[in-house]
Image (cartoon, grey):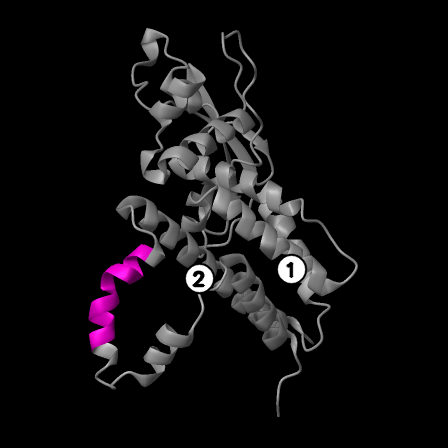
Amino acid sequence: MQVQDPGQRQAAEATAGDRDSHQGLRYRTLYFMDTPYGSASLPVWERPEPQPRAAPVPLSRAKIAATAIRLADAHGLDGLSVRKIATELDVGPMRLYDYVVNRSELLDLMVDAVYARIAEAGQHSEWRDTVLAIVHRTREVALDHEWFADLLGARPHLGPHALAVGESTAAALSKAPGVRGIDDLQRALGALNAFIVGALRREITERRTARSTGTDVSAWQAALGPYLTRMLETGRYPTVARLVVDGAHLDAEETFHHNLVTILDGITSHPRT
């Protein structure tokens, strides 16, 4: 095994299904690095693009990610597969494995392409304007790419564009009043991210439910109206009754903004003694 440079080595490994090297089946190059936990492959963002070769259809990771995003937008993550992407690109499925090792790397590329749009929100002169711009852009792209919300809330995304968004958000929050140290900043980021994930997943789940059932919120409420009326007339749920009778149907975007501002006010104010 050839050592590429200190802490990093290169190995060749057959593509999936290429078991018989004597048949002339091609190999792909994988890049590894040494870590305190053993050898690990380099992240997809740090590996060089495969060398171009004579082929009817030129490929790149950006082109593969864009195609995968279009398929996921149309059919969701469950409808996404390497074979479908290859069909869209008019190439053989095995060719894609020169660019991504597995589905996880494919999702990483897709997510980071979405973060590239969020990063366009940019920096503003005031910390609050920067955070508001980033979070509203996050909602905008999540509504365009509903599958994106399904991938939020787990381990942090570490692609270059995701890191850029994370840096902009953290740098802005670090300038807020009441954020006076790294512990405050971590808590503020945690609370903000929890709001974003929860709010987006709820809104997108509601949209999906309306599509899958053919019934929007108003129609669903009307269908259950007689039952709910009977239950509320028992007098056991007075606060719920106030919400149902007196509460207005709030605009989703306005509600998102109002709640976001409330969260920012809370997590960046000076703590009470």
Membership of 149 in magenta stretch: no
Q: Secondary structure at mark 1?
A: helix
Q: Secondary structure at mark 2?
A: helix
Q: Is residue 103 visible?
A: yes
Q: Position of residue 190 (x, y in %)?
A: 53, 67
Residue at 54%, 10% in the rendered image:
53
Q: Quadrant of residue 21?
A: top left
Q: CA distance from mark 2 to mark 1?
A: 17 Å
Relative to 170, does residue 29 appear above or below in the rendering? above
Q: Which residues are magenta?
A: 219-230
The residue to which callout 1 is attached is 132
* Type of amino acid at the residue the image marks with label 2: Gly
Q: Position of residue 103 (x, y in %)?
A: 39, 35
* Type of amino acid at the residue the image marks with label 1: Leu
Relative to 69, does residue 184 appear above or below in the rendering? below
Relative to 221, does residue 146 appear above or below in the rendering? above
The residue to which callout 2 is attached is 198
